[in-house]
Amino acid sequence: MPGLEYLIAALTPFHIMLALAGVVAGTIVGSLPGLTATMAVAVLIPITFSMEPASALILMGAIYTGAIYGGAYAAILLNTPGTPSAIATTFDGFPMAKRGDGDLAVTLACIASVVGGLVGAAFLLWLSPPLAKVALAFGSVEYFWLAMFGLTMISALSQGSLLKGLIGACFGLLLSFVGVAEISADVRFTFGSRTLLGGIEIVSALIGLYCIPVLIDMVATPDRHLKVTHKTGGFRLAEALAFSWNYKFNLIRSSVIGTLVGILPGAGGSIAGLVAYSEARRASKNSKDFGHGAPEGVQATESANNATVGGGFIPTLVLGIPGTPPDAVILGALLIQGVRTGPTLFTDNGSTVYTFIYGLFLATLLMLPTGLIIGRYAYRTIITVPKSMLVPTVAFMTIIGSYSIRNSVSDVMIMIALGVVGWFLNRFGFSPSPIVLGLILGRIAEQGFVQAWTIGAATDELPAMFFGRPISLAIIAFILLSLFYPLIRGRWAAMRSSTDAE
Amino acid sequence: MTISRTIILAAMVALTPMAMAVAGQDKDYPDKSVSYIIPFGPGGESDITARLQQPFFKEKFGVDLVVSYKPGGGGAVAWSQLNSIKGDGYTIMGINLPHIIVKPLQKNVGFATKDITGIYMFHYTPDAIVVKKDSPFKTLKDLIEFAKANPGKLTMSGSGKGTANHIAKVRFDKMAGVKTTYVAFKGTGKAAAAMLGDQVKAEWGYTSVGAKYGDEVRLLAVAMNKRHPKFPNVPTFKELGFDLVSGAYRGIAVPKSTPENIRVKLSKMIGEINADPAFRKKMEDAGMALLDVDYAGMGAFMAKMTDIYTKAAREAGVIK
């Protein structure tokens, strides 16, 4: 174990207090749709001026990890991902809450987040320098294929009609083109409107597409928002722990996936959660329960998205390339402190780095008690507050949230417009997830494609660029597997049943 | 007589508070915290330099400088709203060159360059050609020779299009008589990663890239008048015969309605921060270069830069 003396340095009362305060604040921020980890960390920068770099890092890391977990509450209880990382948590979390298992889902999410966070931090502690190379080996063309892989998951994720899923994804792709293009700086599809100039912001689109339809339905239907089947008050901790133990392979696999995706700068928690979710579903014996409240789904996404925290710090600290948006802010704060991240950080500033990594372990462990308590409080609030209070409160939060991302009224208008569109589309059987996926992945795919094409065309190696790189080929293999797996599985099941019949 | 005297007296009494108010605005300013809007997201260089100014502002003027972000449209969202903000000196906004010159020329982005009232340009991050430490290009000459022998095959990453990196590339290609391929990435971090990951042969980056990656990278030349104090061994383009002094310029603007005396005062304040040796050291350690264009000098500076950028952007095909 590298530097046990740093473990002791991390365990001072001051650091424990910072970690605790950070996790609590982060969890609350993350649970409110629209208030993101990036923002929470940015607000803190002036406070960290007067701190030692290691203490500042612990505080920012704790907030970050808490916020990623906090995103699960809104996903489970309101069907609204509090952060993009929690998109896939809505798939099974909300159905669980609907049928009265919201408390179990929240507790499971807490355990999964702690496990994911610990796995990510362990990779950060032991394998940072070799894994940082992965971030560099992943070029533009790999991001393009990764985005394609993400899009094929729509076939796995869309419940009901595949065609509607694909139409939704195309709509999302179209939305991703609006505004000033990331690379070419062209102004596209704004129709002369200043509102659309900044493009469609992902978090405000999330709030609109997921939350507004839920709000409209809450008003339109007389039943309770969530069914309550049993006396509330407990955590259902024993049940959740037993389940987590029985499905430990799912937890570990999802955590490793989360860490690996987290290492890729620009991929982020949303892709990590989706990849882990679809792998969990593929591997599960209960795969047909997925999407209807399978606890394994919640487990997979929540462990994967918290693992991206540790994973994302790997390129940030080793290469100075931020793995995720909050990492970029943390990197900036370190630069102001005069700490130079990069290849020599682990040797020159070992005490800062290792103290921080142990601090991250500490914060993740503290998330278990604090997460359970805040989670229970959140669940109780949602089920006991009457709808007449809940709806205006949540509606108010959606507006504050979508405004505060970029301090922009345009984002609020876009959020409401997409919400109304989303409600109508829901009635015709289109779910919001493919649309949001198209919106997120469209930008990644476009950038990767344009860059790879430019480089390939300049060096006269276009086919080799797209089809000649080993990592690309591996991702293409996954794409094919993901596309044809339902077919193969179906044929296999048919063969099995025919042999059984004989 | 008495009447006119009374009138004059009354007028004087009435006017005194106004005169005092005008003088007072300047004397008391700032007496509460100043909001500093960055038109980009947190974590970028615009954010980092603002954060470096923050503690010095508080120390010198006794009030907080509160940084907030309004990203979108490559800065256009914030700049198009600048003049609708109340001009009392308590809200200021970061401005970036070439953005505020090139963007309005490309398309209607909701503001024109002349709408923006800059009061100080406080630094620039000089453009630089950066290669990986094991690159075969040891000097700028090596790179030019390769580009001449293989037209179009020298791939260079850079941050965005119509940006400082892109325009430096276009100007340099013309000066050196070479044809290179520019690959735009979203941000300097990703452009540097592409160079470190051997996706491209070199990067149009900044001196700050050299400061960040240390021995992992080599700067071939920097676009400054004199060598950067942090990199005494790296030649300038000028020394090598290319008249290229350029980079990402950053400054501060105020809403158009801000009174003249506050503009002047604020410009002096930012200049004071810039003159502080501790601030200069922090900026230079991060690889930036300081610049002092005050309110009086803004007009001439903008005219010169507009001329350079308009020509280069037209050649780059960024504007028609």
Image (tube, coloured by chain):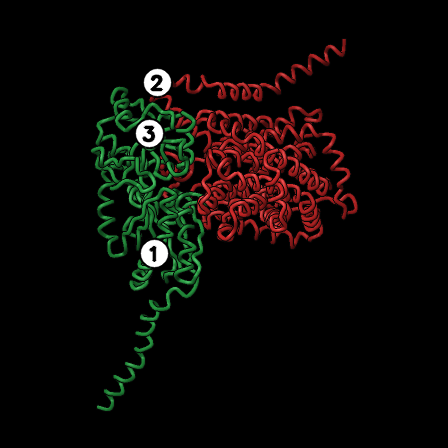
**Looking at the rendering, which quadrant does residue A262 occupy?**
top right
Residue designated by label 1: B270
Left of A404 or right of it: where is B146?
left
Q: Which residue is at the front of the view, A115 or A290?
A: A115
Q: Residues at badges 2 and 1 in contact (C-beta under 8 Å)? A: no
As shown in the figure, which amino acid type bears the numbered disc 2?
Asp
CB under 8 Å between discs 1 and 3: no
What's the mark number on residue B252?
none
Q: How far apart are marks 2 and 1 (CA)?
A: 50 Å
Label 1: how many Cα within 10 Å (few below 14, some 14–19, many 20+): many
Q: What separation in Å lies between label 3 and label 2 (alpha carbons)?
A: 15 Å
Q: Where is residue A227 in the image (x, y as percent from the top left)?
A: 73, 44
Furthest-top residue in this view: A502
Q: Tell me where residue A15 appears, x and y as whole percent.
A: 60, 48
Q: In this view, does A277 lie to the left or right of B306?
A: right
Q: Are marks 2 and 1 on the same chain?
A: no
Residue behind mark 3: B182
Q: What element carries label 2?
A: loop
Dot 1 lies on which element?
helix
**Residue in the foreground of this view, choosing between A325 and A55:** A55
Chain B's shade in the image?
green
Which of the pair A338/A293 is nearer the observer?
A: A338
Q: Distance between the residues labelled 1 and 3?
A: 36 Å
Amino acid residing under circle 3 = Tyr
